[in-house]
Amino acid sequence: MKKNINRRRFLKGSLAAAAAASLPLGLVEVSWGKQDHRNFTFAYISDSHLTHIRGSEFVRNFDKGLKKAVMECNFMSIKPDFVVFGGDLAQLGKREEIDHGLEIMSRLRYPVKWVVGEHDFYLDMGEYWEKKVSPLYYSFDHKGVHFVVLNSILTYDEWINKWASPEERMQNMARLDNPNGSPFMVKKEQIEWLKKDLSRISKKTPVVVMSHSPLYKIFKPWNFWTEDAEEVQAILAPFEKVNVLHGHVHQILYNQIGNISFQAMMSTAWPWPYPVSYKQKPNEVPKLTVFMNRADPFKERDATGWSILNLEDGRVTNHLKLWENKDRILRYDEAKGHLVDTEYQEPSKRIPPQEHY
Amino acid sequence: MKNLILFITILALGCTCAAVADEFTKEDLKKWQAEYMAAVKEGEKLFHSSSLGKNKVSCDMCHPNGSNTHPETYPKFQKQIGKVVGLRDMINWCIQNPLEGDILKADDPRMIALEAYITHERRGTPLAPGKH
């Protein structure tokens, strides 16, 4: 019975997704209006947090999440042009963890664009990542879209240098609710690079910025926060269509600041609560976001998943592939000027598990 | 008669003593608060360490600042367990499953410390037993 319900729910969700996108399940189309038909698809996997136990042992649950996302991406009915990994491949930046992640990700049949997360970085300040995985920041053009990858998880030098060992620094950055933590930053060097990089392109070119931390401010105590976010936003503001895609928060989260649409990607490992559920400190969780269902701890894949992204006229439509829940679709509403959930945005349409307290 | 007076005197003294024993001072409050906060601190340490489990996973990885544990809603019906359970039953479920560790006894000081930390981070929230 349970299986039937799940199957029915799955089919219902799939149909809704397909109907909304006018595309079969698993297909993502990027289109630039009637003049330009260079359509393409891409997928987004993030925050796998592969955790080394000892020898060749890793936390089974987190391995399963990443393997499942890789398998599903490989089964996409129309092949995506590339897959983005949104950061935090590892838990404590260990070579064992990064190597293990690369091995699992190597089963993908598509090229991968990498974003670095703080869990990949703070053991050796990104040295192994740069050597084995990817540059820390870069840009590329793909069929009329300008993509920018930022390393948004930098922080103050004083904090970086205050620890007795790299392991201690990594442990302290890995603890989300650390009162001795330090806020994420893009920093001057990259901000200057970004200005230069974007000076080459027309203001009409759709821009997709991919970072690990959200490039706006939500809740400093958990580093749902980028300290110099406003400086980055100011550089992006003159462009007509800007999409910022980020990981880190392990939840459905979206916002609109001016012309910039922000969307979070799910984690394949575990969900995080919304800062509204921590009562001791104020937060700035965007009012626009319709929360994901509260996670059922008895289902280890609940509130985790990955995304298929569809850029329609330069705006990102996000098909969230949620493993234990109905899929959700976030789409830019031209009339409203911000992202909406295609099913739940109206308060009267919301369901009890979406209430977080 | 003398004996009776002595008895009454002793009784009266006894009552006075009992009344004194019932009262507590600001120093007492400070001491008890310190004892409580020591349990909270110990709970915070356990909550953020991998010592409860066997796979390096810790409670705070899913529950920063103990959030989304909702101690104020227990006891409540947990559909997966099929009955009304207490907070400590869910703590043990988490230790056994995501953390792949061994359950704690109800009176284990570590269990008390975990409950103290989780509840402390939720202080000020009205009780809502049974709520989902």
Image (cartoon, helix red, strand yellow):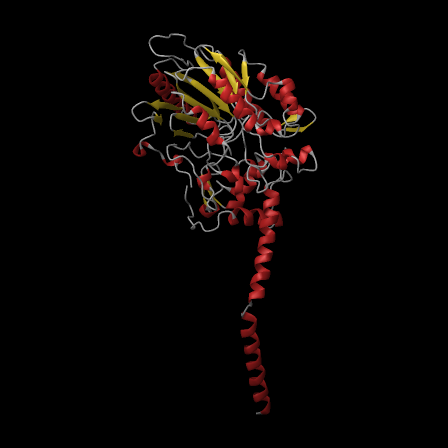
Q: Residue at coordinates 54% horizontally, 17% vertically from top-left?
A: A113
Image height of A52 relative to B15, above or below = above
Is residue A276 visible in the rendered image? The answer is yes
Q: Residue at coordinates 63% horizontally, 20% vertically from top-left?
A: A130
Q: Residue at coordinates 59% horizontally, 91% vertically from top-left?
A: B2
Q: Where, by quadrant of the figure, is residue A332 drawn?
A: top left
Which quadrant, please, contains the C terminus of chain A? top left
Left of B106 or right of it: where is A287? left
Q: Between residues A260 and A78, which one lies in front from this camera angle?
A: A260
Which quadrant, please, contains the N terminus of chain A? top left
Residue A133 in the image, given as x and y percentages of width and height: 61, 18
Image height of A206 relative to A341, above or below = above
Residue A96 in the image, given as x and y percentages of width and height: 67, 24
Image height of A218 relative to B120, above or below = above
Left of A337 or right of it: where is B86? right
Q: Residue at coordinates 58% horizontally, 50% vertically from top-left?
A: B40
Q: Between residues A203 and A98, which one lies in front from this camera angle?
A: A203
Residue A312 in the image, given as x and y percentages of width and height: 37, 16
Left of A326 or right of it: where is A120? right
Q: How many marks?
A: 0
Residue A200 in the image, given as x and y percentages of width and height: 47, 15
Is residue B57 visible in the rendered image? The answer is no
